[in-house]
Structures are given as structure tokens and as C-alpha cells.
Amino acid sequence: MTRYLVELSEENLPLAEAELAAAAEALGGGTSPPAPGDPADCRAVELPDRASAVALAARLALSRRVLRGWPEQSPDGVLARLAADASPNGSASFRPWGHPGGGAGDPWLADLVRAWRGAGGRIDLEAPERRFYYERGPADAGWFAEEVAAVDRRSFDARRMPKLPFQRPVSLAPRLARVAANLARIRPGDRVVDPFVGTGALLVEAALLGARVAGVDHDPRMVKGAIRNLAYFGLEAEELVVADAAEALDRLGREPFDAVLTDPPYGRASGSRGELPTELVARVLPLYAARSRPGGRLVVVLPGGADPVGPPFVRVLSVGDRVHRSLTREFRVYERPAGADTRAGAVSRPYTRR
């Protein structure tokens, strides 16, 4: 395993940490304890190889970049390795950590640039082949790292609702939909279902992670719209059913789900055929959870309240996210223990608004 550092964004730190941990697990790694000198806005993970670190950056929504700290941290060691690493005419940038505008007048920066150029490299601040970050402290203490991959945050903006062919005023933002998909620890080939598909935001993010996706909605306009939104990104669901979610379960085949991923309706105006949202969730989610394989996860976005499923499922995570002044939703993660009997049902305990 190799240790990497991930710079988190400032949108929701607990949610960013949870997303990072789950995504690292999906790639065969996990989190790692902090080490002296690690920047405060970074978290450490251990991954099998560099390809996994690049894949991690491609998965994450609430982070900025993945870095690998150099074992050489003393000034002499860093400068010697830079001189040995620089390729003729290879480009690089050097930036002090936490100061993206650069470090003009910094003597340590001047030494780094001199070492790189002295070995035949060149400086390119716009599109360098390699990006280096450093932080120097007193008595030669400090930190030096190279960026492995950056998170493409603009790609999430390209999937925002105003840019989609099918639009509705209420839908989970692509960045948060990706967080939910990562919390489900989705791996390529996993079977993922959303029993309240809406505009398809969650299925888009799950499919982009390589999942085989299926969904249900009682509104045919939503199902047609979700198909359009998936197709807009070159994606396709295995099955999208127009039906009551509970009644549609048998139409989704008998293969267990690796993950149930959903943002169910909530609020009085969001019910189905006179059924309150709380009643709808309590009736539907236990049925889908019971079809999950051992080790499978249910990730659901709720406005708080009691757990919608019970044993054998265990709640492993609940992180709040403020929508606006009067509404905070929770990203809940439930897991069926690996040893749980697949024939066991999930017991519903209807949630209530706090």
C-alpha cells in the first residue's frame, strides 16, 4: 500500500471525510492516521498503487486533489531528488501550500526552481506536466508533495440541472449525488437501484462509476426524463419501471442489489396518491433493503427522523447537510453485515420529522 494525501474542499468537511473513506475502500484501500507535517486541510489514505490514486481523484466530489508526499523532506534531500527527477525540457510548477497565487520572494521557492532548471527542466505555471506543493517551517521542518491527480470539479457543473434535457426544480445536485454514490462504495459492475428515481441524478452518478443501474418511479414523465438525462451522458439503465415502487420490485429480477441509492420525496406536497412521504418510505425501503446482498449498502437522503430500516441492517453513518435555513437533510448509510442471512427481512421503523 502507498500513502497519499487528499485535499478536501470546505463545503461540508464531515461529508467530505465520509466520502473519501468510502471511495478509498471501494478502490481496495482505506484511510490512514495523520502524520506530523500533514497539512490541516488534507486527509491521508492508503491505496494499492498510483492508478488507484488517479481513480480516486476521478471519483471524488468534495475534494480538490490527490498528492503523494515525498519521503525526502529535508531541503537538501528535496533539492537532490528534484535535480535527479527533472527530464530535459520537462515542465513543472512549484507553489507554497495554501497560497495558490505563488510565493514571490520566497527563498525556498527560488531554490526549488533553480534545482529544476539546473537539471534541464522548465517552469510552466499554466499547464505543467508536474505540479509540486511545499510548506516550509522553522528549523528546516516542512512538507513537500507532488500532485498525482486533480479532481475535475467542473465536470459536476456540466451535469447541473439547468444544463440537462429534462429538468425539474427539485433534484439532488450532481456533486451531492456523487457523494451518495461514493458512500455506497460502488464498484464497476455493481447492481444499483433507486426506487424513487426522479430526474435520474443518482443513477447518472452511479452509472458513471461503472454500476449497472435500475430505477422506479410512479410518474411516467419522470421515467422518460431520467432516460433522456442518462442518454445525454451516453448512459443507459438496465431497467426503468413506471409503477409503485413496492409493486415494481419483482419486475427488477431476482439478482441481489449491491446498493440501494435513493433521495426519496419528503414534505407534504411530495406524497404519492395521498400517501404521506414518511409512510411511502417506510413501506418501500425495507423491501428493497431486504433484496440487498450481504455486505450491501442502503444510502438514503432523509430530513432526519428514525431509521427507515431495521435488523439485519445497521446504520454506519449519518452526516447532516444544510439545504437552507429551515431544512437540513441527512446522508444516511445502512449496511447489511456480511454474515447476514439473505432471506432475512428488514424491519421498518417509520421516520418522523424532528
Image (cartoon, helix red, strand yellow):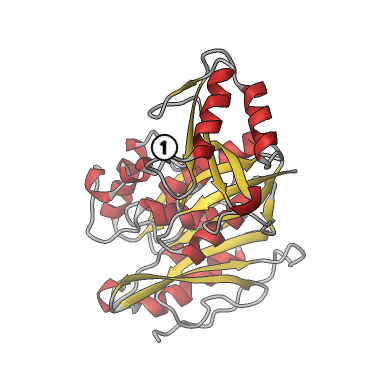
Asked if one can make out residue 210 in the rendered structure from this viewpoint, the answer is no
Q: Residue 122 appears at what percent x and percent y?
A: 48, 19
For residue 48, above or below residue 38: above
Question: Which residue is located at x 23 percent, y 56 percent?
Answer: 168
Query: Helix, strand or loop at disc 1?
Result: loop
Q: Residue furthest right?
A: 339
Query: What residue does disc 1 label?
Result: 235
Q: Viewer-proximal residue, 200 or 47?
A: 47
Q: Residue 319 appears at what percent x and percent y?
A: 49, 70
Dot 1 amino acid type? Leu
Q: Which quarter of the figure is the N terminus placed in?
A: top right
For residue 228, above or below residue 13: above
Question: Which residue is located at x 22 percent, y 48 percent?
Answer: 162
Q: Residue 210 appears at what percent x and percent y?
A: 53, 40
For residue 55, above or below residue 6: above
When asked about the image quadrant of residue 195, the answer is bottom left
